Image (cartoon, grey):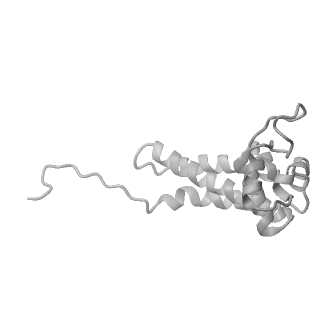
Amino acid sequence: KMGEGKVVKTTTTSGTGLVWGPAVVLAAALYGAHGAREFVYDDRYAIVENPLVTGRFPDAQAWWRELWRRDFWGGLLDSPTSHKSFRPVVTASLRLGVWLHGEQPRPLYLLNAGLHCAAVALVAVLIARLSSAGRSDGAPAMAAMWFAAHPVHVEAVCNIVNR
């Protein structure tokens, strides 16, 4: 008979939502209600006053060239006053957000909250996979909720530039 004498291991993802669902809901409840109403702290310098984010360029190629010449704050990388902090992916995501929504902090902040929710879901799935097979005591979900609500994430989520 087919399959006789062989151990067949199957995996299911039907219960995965029970692991990450509560943690994502918790993260969304904690950070979704905040909703930035104005740019605070470094947001003003890195977004509003940064020519790479809000400046005008003749075309996309000109912006692309400047992206590789400037630091995160918009200063020239070869300047003695530059911090040399170079984060082109974050700068490009801020530019895209401003292009889509204008200089409105709330949509940019909500993207940070959404990225945190995605990270929470990934942590929950990772913990569930690393924990012992068939574990049903809720430990992976609790660990993911701890990660979602831990205060170390507040600055990374609430300050737009800490993406």
Q: Residue at x 87, y 64 (%)?
A: 103
Q: Residue furthest left?
A: 1
- In depth, the one of 31 and 106 nearer the eye is 106
User: Which quarter of the rendering shows the N terminus?
Assistant: bottom left
Q: Where is 83 relative to 149, above or below? A: above
The count of marks equals 0
- In depth, the one of 44 and 1 nearer the eye is 44
Q: In this view, does 3 lie to the left or right of 32?
A: left
Q: Position of residue 123 (x, y in %)?
A: 58, 48
Residue 51 seen in this snapshot: yes
Q: Position of residue 20 (x, y in %)?
A: 57, 56
Q: Residue at x 44, y 63 (%)?
A: 14
Q: Is residue 157 left or right of residue 37?
A: left
- In depth, the one of 67 and 19 nearer the eye is 67
Q: Residue at x 67, y 50 (%)?
A: 148
Q: Residue at x 80, y 35 (%)?
A: 84
Q: Where is 29 relative to 50, above or below? A: below
Q: Where is residue 3 in the image (x, y as percent from the top left)?
A: 15, 55
Residue 32 seen in this snapshot: no
Q: Where is 59 relative to 78, above or below? A: below
Q: Which residue lies furthest to the top in this view?
A: 80
Q: Position of residue 58 (x, y in %)?
A: 81, 62
